[in-house]
Every structure is written in structure tokens, then in C-alpha cells.
Image (tube, rainbow, N blue to C red):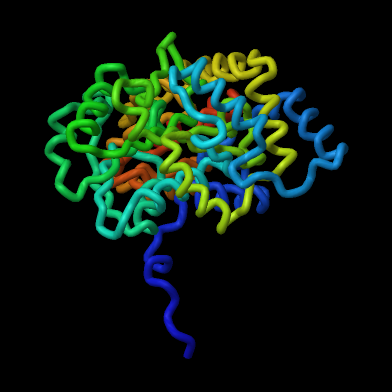
Amino acid sequence: MPKPLSTKITSLAGSATVQVMNKARTLKQQGIDIMDLGGGDPDFDTPQNIQQAAIESMKSGFTHYVASTGIPQLRKAIAKKLAADNGVEVDPDKGIIVTPGGKMALYATIITLLNEGDEVILPEPAWVSYRPIIQLAGGVTVPVNLTPENGFSITAEMLQEKITPKTKLIIINSPSNPTGKVLTRSELETIAAAARDNDLYVLSDEIYEKIIFDGREHISIASFPGMAERTLVLNGHSKPYAMTGWRLGYIAGPASIIKEVGKIQEQAVTCAPSFVQVGGVEALEGPQDAVAMMSAEYERRRNFFIDMLNDIPHVSCFKPEGAFYAYPKFDLGLDSIKLADMLLEKARVAGTPGSAFGAIGNGHIRFSFATAPDVLETAARRIKEMLS
């Protein structure tokens, strides 16, 4: 028999989000009427000006390899955006790498930062891919458990009790997937102080920064004093511009770190697609009215969907402050896996088990409201009918 495969890979969990999306698609193909709220894919089309820029690029023959770090026009547009929107100054030539999707940016960065046994502080509930990527890098995830009872807030005491001599990195995500929590300036100052005092890196996932509600402000921790030299900013085009299938992300930060991240990009994927990057330039430099329209629509959907969820017996839901996810808790005494299966089989509603976002999420289900309002209304009605 052949020798065993890598235990690092065989022990790795698959993406719960992808699994739910695949299961929902399979049931739909069988003719079953499923309300699919499992994924995080906007139901809007990519704006026409972005599509046209990429199409014209392909027609002109711009379909070959480009610089591994990204085409200069896009890196300059990203640097300009970071300065204008976030107060973060980055060298477009040495401090930015354009990647085929945000996951690649996350993977390459964490692999670069961690040695075997390094600890990573991760506020949970947290996006499903953080833990597996930390595991692949040989790191150890140290969760900071956040709860809806205190608005998923993080305090200095929570951080300090988790920091050890092995701690190397703090990962933050604001607005949060799955909770919709937006970190306040005070919370970011607390995290920044912990990073500076303990000489830690921070990876700030800001992919949902443009989807923010109730007049709140997105603040990048990289703009705080003493943080630019230790912060990696992860962002991309998927969520704000409805470009999930384009696979376009980026990582920005200190040139000395970005140089090393670039080695992984070179060896793994060479570069992000050339013509996709041209579309990315147009997204950042062209009209932004579509971004504002989509965000306003997500806020409208949030308002009625959260109210409907909170009207269901045995269900309570934190009102998201950003992103496009609801993360209700079901007081039914069921774990999240059984709960998600029950919702899919009996209510024909697909959601992602809350435990996929950390053990603290058991009993929760994540629903995406980046889908048509009638789908959201039908899903909430079906859940209520089932539980009633």
C-alpha cells in the first residue's frame, strides 16, 4: 500500500460554508424548493462599468502573465484607496500584493508569519477559514469567546488572559463574519495597545468595510500610532463590488513582510488574472454609487429579516452592524449541526452551523441576507411555522 497522506491535510476540516452551499445546490437540482441562506455571495450582478473594463481588456489581448504582485495600476489604486478611506499609507510598489481572492491573501500571510507552535489570538465566533489556515501553518488558535449578551464586544481583560510568550498574532475581522459586529474605536485601541505592549502582529480582515449600517464608521487599526509596522490589512473586491466569482483580493502592509508573502504567491499561483485586475482598477477608480446602493439594500433587508427572526419562538438575534449575515441563537437544546440539518430537512432553509465559527457558536445558525427579500421572508416564515 502507498504511504499515508499528510496528516496535516487529512486532519483538516473542510469549509462548512462550502459544504452547506453544495448540499443546497444538490437538493435544488433534485427539484426541492430550498431557501438558500448558507453562502456569502451577493445576489447583485457586478456593475456594468467593471464588467466592460475587463471585457475590453481581454479583447485588447491583455490575457497573459503579469507581475506576481499585481499590475502597477491596481496597486496604485489600492494604495490611493487605503490612504483616502482608511488613513493608511502603503508603498504601492513594495507594500501590496494582489491575490486571486482574499483567501489566498490570508493563507499566504499566515504561512509567512507563523512558525510551528506560534499562538494566534482569534476572537470567536470567527470566519470558518481562519482556524484551518492557522493549522496548516503549524500555529495554535487561542480563541477569545464573544457573546451576543454583551454585543460581541472585546475587552482588555479578555485579551490579556490569552496572551502568552508564544503569542505572535491577533486576527480581527470588522465588520464580522458571522456576527455583523463592527469594532468600535475604543475596542480597536484596546487591541492596538495589546499588540504594541506585547510586540504582536495584527491581521485586520476588512473585506466587509463598505457594508456598514446605522451611520457607523469603519476604522482600520493600521491607522493607529505604532500599528502600521505590525499590521497586515486584508481586503478585496468580492463583497463591496459583487465580484465573488472574479477572485480578487489583496494584502497590504510592511514591505519587509510583503516581500516574503510574495514568495508564496510566486510559487503557488504566480499572479491574479490579468484582465480581472483591470476590472479591479475600474472598481476602485470608477463610480461608487453601486456600492452605496447595495449597502443600503442590505441594511433594508437586515431591518425586516432580523425583526422576523426575533419574532420566532425560541430564537433571538443580535442586530448586525455591518456585513450581510444574521447569527441567531436557537434555544432548542440542539447542537448546530443537528439544528442546521433539521432546518434544511423540515423547513427547507439552508444555513451554516454556528459551531463552524467556533465552539462558542454552538446553538447558532448563520444566515446570509445577501439574497432576494422574498427568499428571506419565505425562509423566516418557514422557520417560524416549523418551530411553532
The quadrant where residue 197 appears: top left
Between 222 and 304, which is closer to the camera in this rendering? 222
Q: Position of residue 198 (x, y in %)?
A: 18, 37
What residue appears at the point 42 percent right and 18 percent down from the top-left corner?
218
What x and y, as percent, mark residue 165?
15, 48
Q: Specify the farthest residue to the right.
A: 59
Give the residue at x 66% y 39%: 246
Q: Is residue 220 visible?
A: yes
How many numbered discs, if any? 0
The one nearer the camera, 234 or 297, is 234
**Residue ID at (22%, 46%):** 167
In the depicted view, which residue is nearer to us: 299 or 237?
Answer: 237
Q: Position of residue 243 (x, y in %)?
A: 64, 34
Q: Residue furthest bottom?
A: 1
Does residue 55 appear left or right of residue 121 in this picture?
Answer: right
Q: Nearer the viewer, residue 283 or 262?
A: 262
The image position of residue 212, as x and y in percent, is 46, 18
Instruction: Classify residue 81 as left or right of residue 325.
Output: right
Question: Residue drawn 25% across and 21% down?
Answer: 189
| Quadrant including the C terminus | top left
* Res 178 seen here: no
| 243 vs 87: above or below | below
